[in-house]
Amino acid sequence: MNILVCLKQTFDTEERIVLKDGRIQEDGVKFVINPYDEYAVEEAVRLKEQHGGQVTLLCVGPSRCEEALRTALAMGADEALLADDPALWGDEYTVAKVLAAMARTRPFDLILAGSQAVDDGSGQVAIRLAEELDIPHIGTVLKLEVAGQQVTAHRDAEGDVEVVRGQLPLLVTAQQGLNEPRYPSLLGIRRASKKEIEHHTLASLGLQAEDIRPRTEVISTYLPPAKQAGRILQGDLAQQVEELVHALCDVEKVVG
């Protein structure tokens, strides 16, 4: 079984976010594999152990992403591809286009990805990738079984569980609870350090800049306001309701 895993490197969730001139500062920050992608890596390695085959990692990002890729290689993945050409970076539309081009360089039966990234939380890239490759997808999976060409997935459905069946090839996104990611062994770390990572550029993937041009633009980035102390509404019920409506409409502006 040939399995592709989409991987993103993100801030460690324990890191403090610092903004300067509207940009997130990366100096001295610890980066890790996006936690949801880590579930995808673990599931791919488990499936390889059960059925045999090859696990290939796909990543779009700067050269520092090599650290995350080598961690995933140490977990049991076989090879890694990194699109570290800045011309290939952009929004979710761009990344899905680039991942699709990378995926087409390898045979695949199954693609695994995290349900979302903990930094932007858009949950778009993997689903867009499935559309680009014209294959079905099953999202937020908590349990995955593969038997021949048939896939049975138990997925999170707003607090309930939905059982979905599909045929390979398809794409699956991993949700927390799918598995417990392993720690890389010392032997795995040594092997991973010796593996070559395949680097890709705009030219090597045969893409045109206009075809992958971002469709969205970040206008501003800012931290949420500091939390204020709670307030107890005063007066009788009618006065409390009036005060609440005023707060929601005119102060917090969460109701139009």
Image (spheres, rainbow, N blue to C red):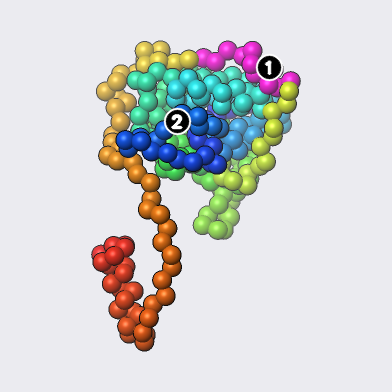
Quadrant of residue 167 in the image?
top right
Closest to the camera, between mark 1 and mark 2, is 2
Q: Earlier in the sequence, mark 1 or mark 2?
A: 2
Q: In this rendering, would 230 be left or right of 37? A: left
Residue at 63%, 20% (x, y): give it: 78
- As shown in the figure, which amino acid type bears the numbered disc 2? Glu
Q: Position of residue 172 (x, y in %)?
A: 54, 38
Residue at 45%, 25% (x, y): give it: 60
Tag 2: Cα neighbours inside 10 Å, few (<14), some, or many (≥20)?
few
Residue at 30%, 31% (x, y): give it: 214
Residue at the far bottom in the pictured view? 236
Q: In this rendering, would 199 be left or right of 179? A: left
40 or 133: which is nearer to us?
40
Quadrant of residue 91 in the image?
top left
Magenta segment includes 62: no
User: Which stretch appears magenta?
Assistant: 187-198
Q: CA distance from mark 1 to mark 2?
A: 29 Å
State the mark number for residue 191.
Answer: 1
Q: Secondary structure at mark 2?
A: loop
- As shown in the figure, which amino acid type bears the numbered disc 1? Arg
The residue under label 2 is 26
